[in-house]
Image (cartoon, rainbow, N blue to C red):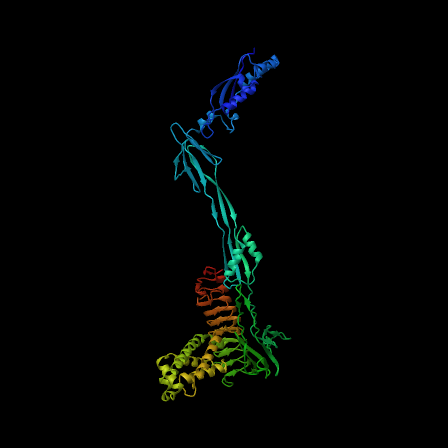
Amino acid sequence: MQMSRSVVSRGKDVQEAIALALQLLNTQRDNVDIEVLEVESKGLWGIGRKPAVVKVSTREGRSAGSTSPADSAALPTAPDKTDAFEELVRTIEQLEIPEDSLSSVPERRDSATAARHAEGKVWVRNGQIYCKDGINKFPTVTPCKGAVLYKNGEPVDGSVIVTENDTLRVETEREVTPTKWEIFLSPDQLKAILQVKPGSIIERKLLDQEPADHLDLRLEEIRIRKNDIDIKRVLDRAAELGIVQGINHAEIVRACESEEGGEFVIAVGREPEPGIDGYLEFMVDVSEQTSGPRERYNGTIDYREKKRIPSVKKGEVIAIVRPPREGRPGLTVTGVTLLPPPVRAMEVKTGKGAVLMEDGMKVVAIEAGRPHVQIRGRLAKIAVLEKLYHDDDVDMRSGNIRFTGDVEIFGNVEEGMEVSAEGDIILHKNVNMAKITSGNSIEILGNVIGSEVVAGKSNLFIAEMSLLLGEMAVQIRQIITAVEQLYRTPAFKTADIQRVGLSSLIKILLESKFKAFPGLVKQFYEKARENKQVLDDEWLEFANRLYLGFCTIHPNELKGIEDLERIKHKLNELHQFSLTPPDPNASIHLPYALNSQIYCSGDIVVTGQGCYNTRIYAGGVLKVKGFLRGGDIYAGWGAEITEAGTKGGVPTRIVVPHDRSIIIKLAMEDTVVQVGKKQHKFLQETRNIYARLDQNNELLLF
C-alpha cells in the first residue's frame, strides 16, 4: 500500500493547474482526487488577475505512476525516489511564485499592488485606454484635436467620466493634403514655369500615458511628404495652354519627382535678337584733346598750344553713315513670333564746308578746317569750321565779331562789345563788361569783369523751347482735323466758299477755336530771333514760316492741307529733337570772374583766384580751385569748391540735383548748400564738407 500524497498547484485556469499537479505527482487523472481551492479571475484590463489554485491528492493503495491495479503491480518500487519526490513537492510549495509569472501577460507589480495603484485612474497603453473604478472617484478623459473618443460606441465631445464597464475606443484622423501645381507663363511668354507644392500625409498615433485621475489624450504626428503629380496631366495642361516651343521633358520629370517642390522651367522660347541702329563711323579724329599749356624753351607758357584742334582737308571723308541692321525674330513658348525692337537710321545733315555723297552714305569735306559734329539722339549735324584770328582788342574800332567757325582773340574784349562764334572761342586777355557767346567751348586766359559768358546757348534755347514746341505740335494736329472736317461739309463744297482759300479758313479757326495758337507762334518766333547768332538757319526759316502763316495770315504761305501736314511734321521733329539731352561737349575755362553771369551746358572750371558775386549755371560739373564768394550757383553734375562764402557773411548759395553732391574744403558763414530740395545754412566756418542725400532722402554734410 502506498501513502497518499498531495500537491497544491496554480495555473492560469483550473485545467492548467490540474495538469501541472499531475506532472509533479507523476500520475494520471484517474488516480487522484481534485479539490479546487480558487477559481481563476481575469480582472479588469489585466489588473487584479488571479490564477486558479487546486489541490490534487493521490488515492491510497495506488502507485504514483499506475493507471490501473494491474499496471501498478507491474511498476517497481523505489523508496529513495519517493523521498526525493516528496522533498521536491515541499520545496515547490514553499516557493513564492509571482502570479504574473504564470500569466500570459507580464506585469511589473503583483495584482494587488497594481490594483491599489490604479484605483480611480485611467491610462493609455499600446494605443488602448484602460481604467479602474475607485471607491469615491471616477477617472475622466478629454479627447484631443485629431482624435475621436468613442465611449460605448458613441463619440465623445469634451471631458467624460469612464468606468471599468465602458468600452473605450479612439480613432485618430488621417490627414491627406493633395499636391498643388500650376503652369504659368512669364510676362514675355518666353518661359513656361511649373510651380509645385508637394502634398503630405499626416498619420496620428495615440501616445502612452501613465495612470492618472484625468487624462488629456495626446497624439504623435508623423508627416510624410507626397508628390503625386502625373506627368501626363502636366503635358495635357501644357497643351491646353498652347505650349509648343522648347518643352523640356527632363525638367517635367524632375518636377514630378521632387519632394521639395519649387518652380521648374519646363519650356523656353527664343528671345528676339535686337538689331543695330544706324550710326556714324568717323574716318577722322573729330574730338578735341586737352593736354594743358605748353612750356616754351625760355620758361614762359604758350597757351595757344593748350588744345589740339582736329582738322580735315578738302575732299577728305569725314564719316560714313552706316545703315541699321535688322534683328532676328524670337518665338514664345506658345509659338507666337516676337519681333525685335525696330531699328532706327541715323539722320545726318551737313552744314558749311561739308556735303553728303554716294546717296547720303558719306560725309565729305569741301573746305579745309575743323570738323564740327553735333549729335542729339538719332540726329547729327556735321560741318567744317574755319578759324578766325583777331590780333587786336575787340572795341569800337573793330566792332563786334560774329563768325560761323572758331575764333581766337589775342587782345581784350572791351565794354559793350560782343564776340559770337558757332565753334570754340579762345580769349587771351580780359573781358570787361562784354558778352561772349559760343556754340561749343570758351577758354578765357584773363579776367572776366561784369560780363556775360555763354557756351552752348543753342542747347539751352532748344531745351527751353521743348514745352512750347510740344503744345504747338498738339494744336496743329487739332487744326488739321478741324480743316478736314470742314472740307467734308456740304457748305464748303459750294463754289463761293471754295474761293475763300485755306488762309481765310485758318483765320476763322484761329479767331474762334484756336485763339491761343498765334500767341505760341509769336513767342517761338521772337525767341528764335533773339538766339539767331547760335541757331541753325533751319530754325530761323521755320520760325519765319510759322509767323507768316499764322500771325500775318499770308495767303501764299498756306495754300493747301499739304502745307499744314509739312508744318506738323517739322514741329514733331523739332519737339523730339528738343527732348534729347544736349551734347555736353561745351565747356568754359576761366581764372577769375567778378559781378558776371556764366552759363554753360557742360562743365565750368575756374582755374585761378575764383569768382566774386557771380551767377553760375553749369549743366555739367563745376570746379572752383579758388574761392566762391557770393552769388547763386547751380551745377547739374555736382560741385567741387575749395572755399565758399566770406567772413563778412555775403550770402553764397550752391545748388545741385538730388542725386549729386557738393564738396567744399572750407565754408564760411551764410554759405547755403542745397541738394535736391534739402538745404543747410552754415552759421560758422566749417571744413571738409561733403553734402549729399542718403537713401532716406536726408541731407548728409560730412
**Labels in figure, total:** 0
- Position of the N terminus, as image quadrant, is top right
Q: Give the farthest residue toward the front.
A: 70
* x and y percentages locating residue 603 in the rendered image: 52, 71
Q: Is residue 428 visible?
A: no
Residue at 48% across, 62% down: 692
* x and y percentages locating residue 329 in the rendered image: 55, 69
* x and y percentages locating residue 641 in the rendered image: 51, 66
Front residue of this view, candidates 117 and 124: 124
Looking at the picture, does residue 516 appear above or below residue 49?
A: below
Front residue of this view, candidates 59 and 98: 59
Q: Is residue 129 visible?
A: yes
* x and y percentages locating residue 123 in the rendered image: 45, 33
Q: Give the farthest residue toward the right.
A: 297
Front residue of this view, candidates 589 and 7: 7
Looking at the picture, does residue 50 appear above or below residue 357?
A: above
Residue at 47% across, 44% down: 174
Which picture quadrant has residue 522? bottom left
Which picture quadrant has residue 212? top left
Looking at the picture, does residue 545 appear above or below residue 258?
A: below
Front residue of this view, candidates 624 and 279: 279
